[in-house]
Amino acid sequence: MSTPLTLTPGRNPDGAVVLTAVGEIDMSNAATFANALIDTDSDADGAMFTVDLTGVEYIDSAGLAALFPHVERLRLVSNPLLAPVLSIAGLDDITTLGTEPGRA
């Protein structure tokens, strides 16, 4: 059984591509998350894109692993709960972490 996760692609008011995730990202749905990241990266056409994790309550190593292929074009926005996990994974060294969409 897959953990509840909602993934919504879209664009910020400035036209930048964004993928918004709500729920939990774990091994049961990491492939779905990875595929959404691939689609979002493709929609961004080589430009930076944002992954908004402010609505994510939990992310495991499978979810973190899905982010790494995109780090050169990825901007993460997380809630304070996830920020330490993303930092420990080293994502703060290669992406921008923030706590509000559009504010990182």
Image (cartoon, rainbow, N blue to C red):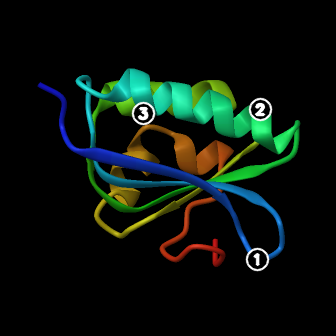
Q: Can residue 71 be seen? A: no
Around disc 2, counting alpha carbons within 10 Å, would you say few (fewer than 14), some (14 to 19), or many (20 or more)? few
CA separation in Å, label 1 and label 2: 19 Å
Residue 81 position, x and y percent, is 28, 64
Q: Earlier in the sequence, mark 1 or mark 2?
A: 1
Give the residue pinned by disc 3.
64
Question: Does residue 3 lie above or below 58 as drawn?
Answer: above
Q: Amino acid at mark 3?
A: Leu
Asked if disc 1 and disc 2 are in contact, CB closer than 8 Å, the reply is no
Q: Can residue 55 be seen? A: yes
Residue 76 position, x and y percent, is 58, 55
Residue 13's disc is: 1
Residue 25 position, x and y percent, is 30, 39
> Mark 3 against mark 2, which lies toward the viewer?
2
Residue lying farthest to the right in this orientation? 46
Residue found 57% across the figure and 73% down from its top: 101
Placement of the N terminus among the 4 image quadrants: top left
CA separation in Å, label 3 and label 2: 19 Å
Q: Amino acid at mark 1?
A: Pro
Q: Amino acid at mark 2?
A: Ser
Q: Earlier in the sequence, mark 3 or mark 2?
A: 2
Residue found 72% across the figure and 36% down from its top: 41
Question: Does residue 58 lie above or below 42 as drawn?
Answer: below
Give the residue pinned by disc 2.
42
Residue found 88% across the figure and 37% down from its top: 46
Q: Quadrant of residue 14?
A: bottom right
Around disc 1, counting alpha carbons within 10 Å, would you say few (fewer than 14), some (14 to 19), or many (20 or more)? few
Q: How many marks?
A: 3
Placement of the C terminus among the 4 image quadrants: bottom right
